[in-house]
Amino acid sequence: MSLFGMFSNKDATNKIEEYLKKGAIILDVRTLPEWNEGHIEGSKHLVLNSIPENIKSIKELKKPIIAVCKSGGRSQSATDFLSQHGLDVINGGPWQNVAKYIN
């Protein structure tokens, strides 16, 4: 279930803001062409299907994670996988949704 399916919009906003205050890494799991069309400055780009082979380096970041994509589906898949591997992660949904909280 996505963050947005579990919480009201206010709760989702609070969760995103909470994670940003904790210094969360924004992990964009879209394709390279999608990333090149626009992304959050300072976010990390890692295509969804490459996450399993990069799990060690993701864990080495030692920071909470906000996963984003185009609509929220792929970021939910990333959230599920990363959570199963012990990481502190939330689904931020569409990247533009999280971008509005970045100064």
Image (cartoon, rainbow, N blue to C red):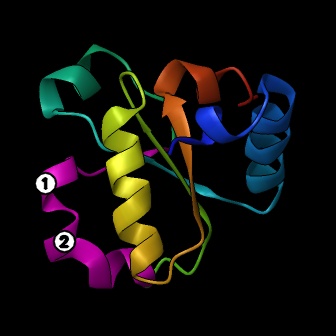
Residue 12 position in % (x across, y down): 75, 36
Q: Tell me if mark 2 has few (under 14), some (14-19) or many (20+) residues whose alpha carbon lies within 10 angstroms of its own.
A: few
Is 65 situated left or right of 35 in this image? right
Query: Residue placed farthest to the top in the image?
Result: 37
Residue at horizontal 27 percent and vertical 14 percent from the top: 37
Figure check: 90 above or below 6: below
Which region shows up in magenta? Answer: 43-59
Figure check: 80 above or below 1: below
Label 1 vs label 2: CA separation?
7 Å
Q: Which residue is mark 2?
A: 52
Figure check: 37 above or below 80: above
Figure check: 23 above or below 20: below
Q: Are marks 1 and 2 in contact (CB under 8 Å)?
A: yes
Residue 7 position in % (x across, y down): 74, 37
Amino acid tagged 1: Asn
Asked whether 11 or 66 is in front, the reply is: 11
Q: Which residue is mark 1?
A: 49
Q: Which mark is residue 67?
A: none
How many badges with numbers are in the image?
Answer: 2
Residue at horizontal 40 percent and vertical 69 percent from the top: 82
Residue at horizontal 49 percent and vertical 77 percent from the top: 61
Residue 66 position in % (x across, y down): 56, 50
Q: Main secondary structure of the magenta part?
A: helix
Amino acid tagged 2: Pro
